[in-house]
Image: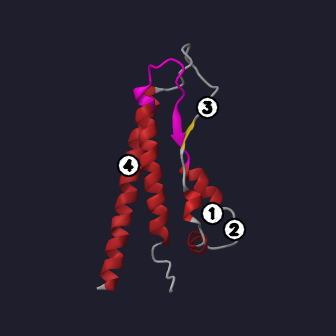
Amino acid sequence: MLNSGIYDYIDVWNKAADAAWLRDTAIVNNISNGDTPGYKRQDVDFEGVLERELGKTKYVSLDDKVSNLHMNHLNVSIYTDAENYSYRLDENNVDPEQEQAKLVSNRIRYNALIDSMSKEFARIKSVIK
């Protein structure tokens, strides 16, 4: 079977979009629990996982790094952020204004990823025609 690598970047964008969707869920949950005593904010670290995976091979072009990525290594999950840190008396570490800003930023990122994938599929489709 011929491996052209045509979908390598799309696969990474897809994983990034999945992570952004999961981060959106975590942020909305943080906002919902902004008044819950003892609640600790949650987040997703796709960027850190991607950086570690891409950094495993030095002196290689980005295209080669992306084509050699194992997509199952890019799976992420929600983690509790700053578990022992709280600036409030009720031990809750959610800052509602910061969470709202992160939510907007994350949704912009998600829409940009979806738009990039759509444009790439359109380019592939135009080449196939």
Q: Nearer the viewer, residue 79 or 62?
A: 79
Residue 85: name its quadrant: top right
In this rendering, the label closer to the viewer, 2 or 4: 2
Q: Earlier in the sequence, mark 4 or mark 3?
A: 3
Give, as a three-letter code, the residue at label 4: Ile
Identity of the residue drawn at 42% across and 40% down: 25
What amino acid type is highlighted by mark number 3? Ala
The residue wearing badge 2 is 57
Disc assigned to residue 82: 3
Question: Which residue is label 1 attached to?
Answer: 54
Q: How many numbered marks have been drawn onto this rendered protein structure?
A: 4
Mark 2, secondary structure of its residue? loop
Residue name at image x 40 percent, y 58 percent: 113
Expressed as whole percent of the image width and height from the top left, the position of residue 30 reads 45, 31
Pointer 4 with pointer 3, Cβ within 8 A:
no
| Residue indicated by mark 4 | 108
> Residue type at mark 1?
Leu
Residue at mark 4 to residue at mark 3: CA–CA distance: 25 Å
Can residue 102 be seen? no
| Mark 1–mark 4 distance (CA, rounded to whole Å) | 24 Å
Range of residues picked out in magenta: 30-45
Q: Are marks 2 and 4 in contact (CB under 8 Å)?
A: no
Looking at the rendered structure, the secondary structure element under dot 4 is: helix
The colour scheme used to paint the residues is: secondary structure
Residue 83 visible within the image: yes
Callout 1 touching callout 2 (CB < 8 Å):
yes
State the image coordinates of residue 44 (x, y, percent, origin top left): 53, 44
Magenta region includes residue 31: yes
Cα–Cα gap, marks 1 and 2: 7 Å
Q: CA distance from mark 3 to mark 2?
A: 30 Å
